[in-house]
Amino acid sequence: MLKTYTKELFEKTIIDMTKEMSFEKIRVKDICERIGCDRQTFYYHFRDKYDLAAWIFTKEYEGILRSTNGKFPEEHAAITLRHMYQFRSFYRKAFSDQSQNAISKYIYNYYVNLGTNAVKKILNMDTLDLEIVYSIKSHAYACIGHTIEWLNGTEKYTPEEFARLQYLTMPQILKKAYGIKS
């Protein structure tokens, strides 16, 4: 309970800080000073600010996933996108950082692993064909790219429209793995 509270305090602090400055300028030292804790407390929970940003996304995404009973309907994507839009200042700034541990790379890998594992399970295979892996990676890459453009205001979709487009363009093998009717 205390561990969750502490992590959520770091979450709130970094989100608030992105309202004032770029993600690149935020330092762990600054986060800890705002909370009034030492850096050791931060490092007990997270490796760095990028790990914190990834935790924020993952916590929300997996919470929504649990609430939809592990299914991947458009509504799951729409809920996730609504959350991202609500905190777009944080996500926009987090996505603008393209360093080694960037959140865009983390989310890309998260989506690829999620899709790969789902397809392996449905096909009962340990290894996937090159074409299947390529289509999973292409879809993940496109979703990340469009999400960044959407958060920056380049693409003018509602979260529901954006979710529908993501599922419309999803490769058939992923739709099958996620139990989506075409």
Image (tube, helix red, strand yellow):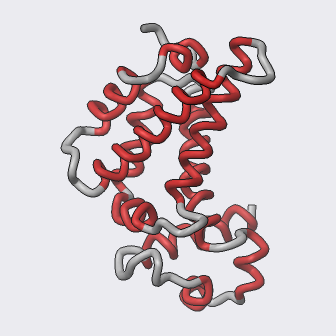
Q: Nearer the viewer, residue 179 or 129?
A: 129
Q: Residue 155: percent from the left, percent from the top?
A: 22, 45
Q: Is residue 90 above or below residue 173?
A: below
The residue drawn where x is 31% and y is 34% is 162
Q: Is residue 149 above or below residue 142?
A: below
**Outermost top residue:** 182
Determine whether, in the image, residue 58 is placed left or right of residue 157. Answer: right
Determine whether, in the image, residue 39 is placed left or right of residue 73. Answer: right
Q: Residue 21: percent from the left, percent from the top?
A: 38, 81
Q: Quadrant of residue 28?
A: bottom right
Determine whether, in the image, residue 99 is placed left or right of residue 114. Answer: left
Q: Residue 46: percent from the left, percent from the top?
A: 71, 69
Q: Is residue 112 above or below residue 49?
A: above
The residue drawn where x is 55% and y is 15% is 173
The residue drawn where x is 29% and y is 48% is 150
Q: Quadrant of the N terminus?
A: bottom right
The residue drawn where x is 53% and y is 59% is 103
Say how many tags the image has: 0
Q: Is residue 70 above or below residue 36?
A: above
Q: Nearer the viewer, residue 48 or 133?
A: 133
**Outermost front residue:** 130
Q: Quadrant of the C terminus?
A: top left
Q: Residue 109: percent from the left, percent from the top?
A: 61, 45
